[in-house]
Amino acid sequence: MSKARWLYQAKKAGHAGTLDPLASGILPIAFGEATKTVPFVMDGEKEYRFEVLWGVETDSDDAEGAPVAISENRPAREAIEAALPAFIGSISQTPPKFSALKINGERAYDLARDGEEVVLEPRTVEITRLELVDMPSADRAVFECECGKGTYVRAIARDLGRALDTRAHVVALRRTAVGAFTEDDG
């Protein structure tokens, strides 16, 4: 934010939600008086396109993490599509331990990187759409998701892998919309 503030010579700057380190895509930024609107944008629905690698679960639930579980199982398209309805609506989700959530004032990802045990409680999140859009190989699947504030796509991949009797993590993640802001607005 400091670089954006400097670039636009703004006294105040704010953004509408963080992106995972490997993620790309939409991150609305507001300057000056517009920073007062950031909470409204953050509460808006978000859309993602993400790719999952089957067979390996990592400690961060993405490609940056270390493997923690491996499976030889690879789900068929029909099995994936049959599992998706359980991930739509108001669902309980345990956030990844490598997340920006705070535990006793410290970020969970800082504690996890320091090797401390991180236990995050499940919370209710809203997922309005989750679709399988491509299967480039038996090891990979591409999904699109529309969800509410606080949803972790990495947790969807992890939990979907477990539900399909395999393991999984996110290898590519792109936020395609935040509220009214879409990639087409560029």
Image: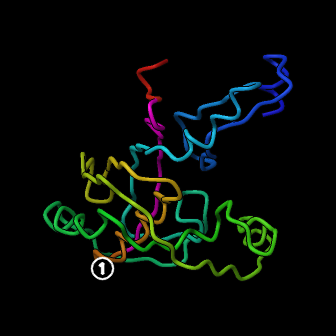
| Crowd tier of the residue under label 1, counting other residues whose Cα lies within 10 Å: few below 14, some 14–19, many 20 or above | some
Q: Position of residue 88 (x, y in %)?
A: 29, 62
Residue 118 vs residue 5, the one in the foreground? 5
Residue holding disc 1:
165
Q: Looking at the rendering, in which quadrant would you find the N terminus? A: top right
Specify the quadrant of the image occupied by residue 168.
bottom left
Q: Residue at x 71, y 65 (%)?
A: 109
User: Magenta includes 7?
Assistant: no
Q: Residue at x 80, y 75 (%)?
A: 104
Q: Position of residue 85 (x, y in %)?
A: 22, 65
User: Magenta includes 177?
Assistant: yes
Q: Is residue 184 above or below residue 50?
A: above
Q: Position of residue 97 (x, y in %)?
A: 63, 71
Q: Which colouring convention does the figure follow?
A: rainbow
Q: Is residue 20 above or below residue 139?
A: above
Q: Position of residue 60 (x, y in %)?
A: 59, 66
Q: Is residue 96 above or below residue 129?
A: below
Main secondary-structure element of the magenta-colored stretch: strand
State the extent of the magenta-drawn residues as a range. 167-180
Q: Is residue 78 left or right of residue 39?
A: left
Q: Is residue 113 left or right of residue 120?
A: right
| Residue kind at label 1, given as amino acid type | Asp
Q: Residue at x 48, y 59 (%)?
A: 151
Q: Secondary structure at mark 1?
A: loop
Residue 48 vs residue 124, the one in the foreground? 124
